[in-house]
Amino acid sequence: MRGLSAIIAIALAQPVAAQTIAIPFAPPIDRTLSYRIEQHRPVEGVARVFSAARDLRFARTADGYRLDVTLRAIDSDAPAAGAEPYRAALTPLIGVTVRFRLDDKGRIIAADDLDAVWAKVQAGIDAMLASFPPDAPRHKAAANVQALFASLSPEGRLALLAGEVQPLFLFAGSDVAGGEGRGLRTVAGSPLGRPVPVEGMLRVDGEAAGALDLEEKLAGDGVQVSIRYHLSRTTGLVESQQRSLAVGTLALTENRVLTLAN
């Protein structure tokens, strides 16, 4: 009995492994979704709004999924100096549908007709350059965007086009650690400053039928990042995300919301 008691005592003394929660990837098929991003960041000392609205639609394929993404509208209340780079980068994409290929884990692996999509983007930039005199802020912004786009490899083009929808799939096809959470290391800072290494924790902050609320807190040299996610346990998609980023005295907040289109 004494030996059995010792074994039980040792077992009880061992740390209990944190529960892991499996996250599927099963996006809604053949239904139009609305994805809105609204960002508040300082321009000339005043917090300004930058927004974009996209339509999304998933379809099943033989080896994964196709995701059609169409940028419908952008807007900003920033003055020209602050808004023109944003408008120049996104205006050529308005109305263009990009068809991404995803695997069963929610990873974007390709885009259909990438050259044709890129040709439309280039044509949009050329039209902007032709519409404004060379000394106009929008012409200068479009020229800068044109130079950036021309420098991208095919992989860089795919990464640029996919960048705004990637946050939807942060947890798809993986798992989330319960209990005290999971340690993270990444890089933060853009668009408020130079990239800075940050680290911290991601933990489950709430659990309900079909959903998880997650909280991520990261810090680095002069940088503080706080992100809250509302994650569907049915689809594996991040249905809402609120991010705050502080770099010194500068602050940025961003809200992302995914809903069924009306």
Image (cartoon, helix red, strand yellow):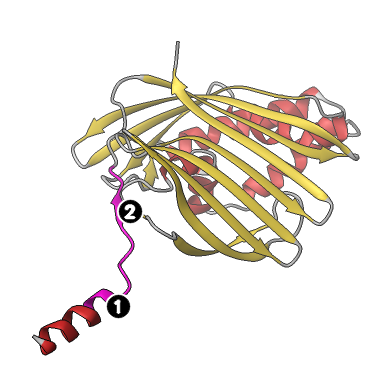
Image disc number at residue 13: 1
Q: Element type at marker 2?
A: strand
- Can you say whether 232 is above or below 150 in the image? above
Side of 95 relative to 78 (left or right): left
Q: CA distance from mark 2 to mark 1?
A: 26 Å
Q: Which of these two is toward me, 2 or 124?
A: 2
**Magenta span of residues:** 11-24
Residue type (three-letter) at the residue carrying disc 1:
Ala
Farthest-out residue, bottom: 3
Which residue: 51% across, 63% down? Answer: 184
Q: Residue at x 25, y 74 (%)?
A: 12
Residue 164 image point, x, y percent:
54, 39
Q: In the picture provided, is 258 more to the left or to the right than 7?
A: right
List the residue tagged with mark 2.
Answer: 175
Residue 135 visible in this rendered orientation of the protein? yes
Residue 161 disc label: none
The verdict on residue 20 being magenta is yes
